[in-house]
Image: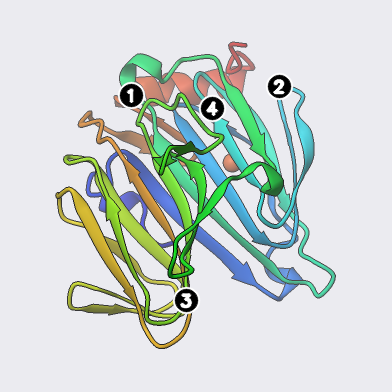
Amino acid sequence: RAFGYSQVPQFDPFLMLDDFHTSNPDEYLAGFPWHPHRGIETITYVLEGLVEHGDSMGNAGVIGAGDVQWMTAGSGIIHQEMPKGDSQGRMYGLQLWANLPQSQKMMAPRYREVKNADIPHIVQPDGVVIRIISGRLNGISGPVRDVVIDPEYLDVEMPADTRLYHPTPPGHTAFIYLFKGRVRVDDLDLQPGSLALFEDGDQVHIQAQASSARFLFISGKPLQEPVAWRGPIVMNTQDELRIAFSEYQNGTFLKS
Ligand code: FE2
């Protein structure tokens, strides 16, 4: 877990980032059997291996390397996520949770699956490659649109000794999560598995070190609302949490 419950509200509007990265199937085959979500969006990005999924809206399928599943739980969804690994048993995925504002916590759930081939990328003159999953860069928009927190979700690969200057909307929360190579941000040297949360500003500057590097760049508009979070459900008040869990127990959780 790169960040989570104990960091609220530092990453607002984001709640959690999990990195599941292993070549031991015993560590992932149990998966995440049927469980509910309400009040959030979960964004799963698979780098290696496969994740089988199914949900209460009738979606079912497999997401593989380079694919993204962007699920808006809204008023409620019940789903399962079962990592399967690749032919060598490797599994590598990242799951981000984004919060929904009070006005949209009970919106109808929706589900977007984006295949690797449908994710546009740009190549800069120095060889930096940016895959745009959500957000807009050089006039190119990522396939995940109409999200309340106006997120950018970019997968950036930098050759050795290159630099990236990336504009950020002032007031938005922005961070990178490095999963390959080393980069320098201000006076910090980051290693794989580390995260840098940027201060407010209008541009970030990232410098790749002696080898190529790959990371996620993520930004979003803070909600600045109270957070009541228990397990897979995130609302604004304890009362709303109690209602959600009692509805789950008595079978009235799903609204659409
Ligand atoms: Fe889930």
On the image, the x and y values in percent for residue 143 come to: 56, 35
Is residue 6 something one can see in this rendering?
A: no
Give SS at disc 1.
loop
| Picture residue at 45% right of the left edge, 61% below the top | 124
Quadrant holding the N terminus = bottom left
Does mark 4's beta carbon lie closer than 8 Å to ligand 1? no
Report the residue marked by disc 2.
57
Give SS at disc 4.
loop
Q: In the rendered view, would you say 205 is above or below 149?
A: below
Does label 4 or label 3 sit earlier along the sequence? 4
On the image, the x and y values in percent for residue 93 come to: 60, 59
Quadrant holding the C terminus = top right
Which circle, 3 or 2, is nearer the viewer? Answer: 3
Dot 3: within a 10 Å radius of its alpha carbon, few (fewer than 14), some, or many (20 or more) residues?
Answer: some
Cβ atoms at labels 4 and 1 below 8 Å apart: no
Q: Which mark is residue 101?
A: 1
Cβ atoms at labels 3 and 2 below 8 Å apart: no
On the image, the x and y values in percent for residue 13 come to: 31, 38
Does mark 2's beta carbon lie closer than 8 Å to ligand 1? no
Q: CA distance from mark 3 to mark 2?
A: 42 Å
What type is the residue that disc 2 sits on? Met
Is residue 203 something one can see in this rendering?
A: yes
What type is the residue that disc 4 sits on? Ala
Does label 4 or label 2 sit earlier along the sequence? 2
| Picture residue at 40% right of the left edge, 88% below the top | 210
Report the residue marked by disc 3.
159
Q: In the rendered view, would you say 213 is above or below 224?
A: below
Does label 4 or label 1 sit earlier along the sequence? 4
Q: CA distance from mark 4 to mark 3?
A: 37 Å
Which circle, 1 or 3, is nearer the viewer? Answer: 3
Looking at the image, residue 235 sits to the left or right of residue 146; the answer is: left
